Amino acid sequence: MIEYRPLRIALLGAGSVGSQVAKILLENKKELALRVGAELELVGVLVRDKQSVRDYQIPTELLTTSPEALILGADIVIEVLGGIEPARTYILQALNSGSDVITANKALLANNGEELFEAAEQVGAQLYFEAAVAGAIPIIRPLRESLAGDKVRRIMGIVNGSTNYILDRMDSTGVSLKQAMEEATKLGYLEADPTLDIEGYDAAQKAAILASLAFHTEVPIDRVYREGISKITSEQIAAAKRDGYVIKLLAICEKISATETEPEGISVRVYPAMIPLEHPLASVRGAFNAVFVEAEAAGSLMFYGSGAGGLQTASAIMGDLVSAAKRHVAGGPGLADSAHADLPVLPISRVTTRYQITLAVSDQPGVLAQIASIFAEHGVSIETVEQSAKMIEAETTAWLEIGTHLATDLSLAAVVAALQSSSAVEEVTSVIRVEGE
Ligand code: HSE
């Protein structure tokens, strides 16, 4: 039975996500009212240009170019504009006036999350953001609610679909990075500024959001270590494949134990890494996303699905909208995140990982011993060595592919620097981390 007054929903933005949200709201109105216990009345849609052609033709009378009246008259505001401003100002206006806000804006949350959550707390409003990370995949709610009584140890995610598509094409068809990027561009997978995807900024924003929820700690975006995929070569992909690995751009959020001299903390990082073909994340193909969570009691969980797309992202927004609307109808405290743990975000040097290093060396007696001694000097143990050799103009060059055991990133980086300046080494041709073993 629907006894509650209609709830006024304002939609800020009518791009690929916004127009799908409007479509679902208008076409599923009756069903949604029954689920919520109140009608969800779309009172207006903020657009830049009322004449633009949209994926779904929103009735003209709902379109407006005046944000203030729309925001201040709403119970729930949905922000799908993207970017920092004016989204930040509009969300603050909405929260300060007591409205709940639903946003898909990962950049804004990663950069200004603290300010937004404080504003929400001041007035008892709620900020929902399921759509900000991994599109349609429910991962924010599981971290905020389902796993709230557990202790997350580590999250390893493929949270950027376009780079996963690019790496997957390189792996499955042997095309170059440039060719795969051209394909991704044609398919509309890349952001308007492709460096956001290629250089890992998009994944870093999502990693900051996931880590802050998982570890109850504020994670400023500038503390997220980031490397993109722009230096990944077809040769690295082929070599990984030969050895039973696949290269993926990973967002990793991890709790790191204290050492005798260093405190406990968390590491939040994004980089391309080799993962074994048997790892569940290795099977994430094309533009799909997946988040692999390891928790103390739950063990390993994997969340998989579409990480982008107008309709898919609209699904996550609609889930948040139903939650927010139900809270209006039934009352209750809503979701509350806490940064009580306040753990330090540690530098990459504290991370323990493995490296796969490929070197070109001259095929002379004693060269292997010289190289081995560099690893030994830095306390890094070699796990595997493979050698291949080729005669180039009377000189024989040998290629060494060296896999290490676990060591701190600090020691591994020192090994690479020493190899680069060693007279025994012609060139360090590839350095890549190995994860998921
Ligand atoms: N550029 C993003 C991606 C879109 O490739 O996953 C979704 O955030």
Image (cartoon, helix red, strand yellow):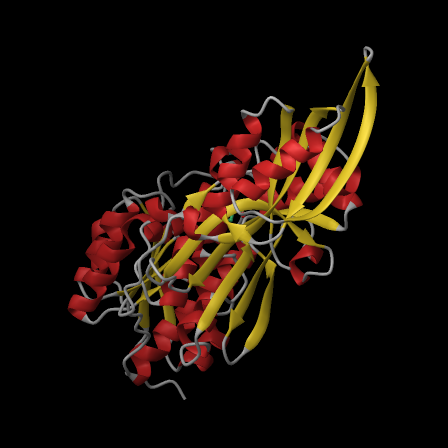
| Relative to 92, 329 lies left or right | right
Quadrant location of the N terminus in the rendered image = bottom left
Q: Quadrant of residue 340?
A: bottom left
Against 295, residue 193 (above or below) is above
Give the residue displayed 25% in from the left and 62% down from the top: 117
- Residue 265 lies, in percent from the top left, at 36, 61
Q: Nearer the viewer, residue 150 or 205?
A: 150
- Left or right for 115, reference 397: left
Q: Position of residue 416 (x, y in %)?
A: 55, 35
Seen from the viewer's position, the closer of residues 86 and 193 is 193
Where 271 sits versus 291, above or below?
Answer: above
- The residue located at (46%, 78%) in the rendering is 146
Residue 315 image point, x, y percent = 52, 63
The reply to whether residue 26 is visible in this rendering is no
- Residue 264 in the image, given as x and y percentages of width and height: 35, 63
| Extreme-top residue of the structure | 393
Look at the image and tell me in which quarter the C terminus lies.
bottom right
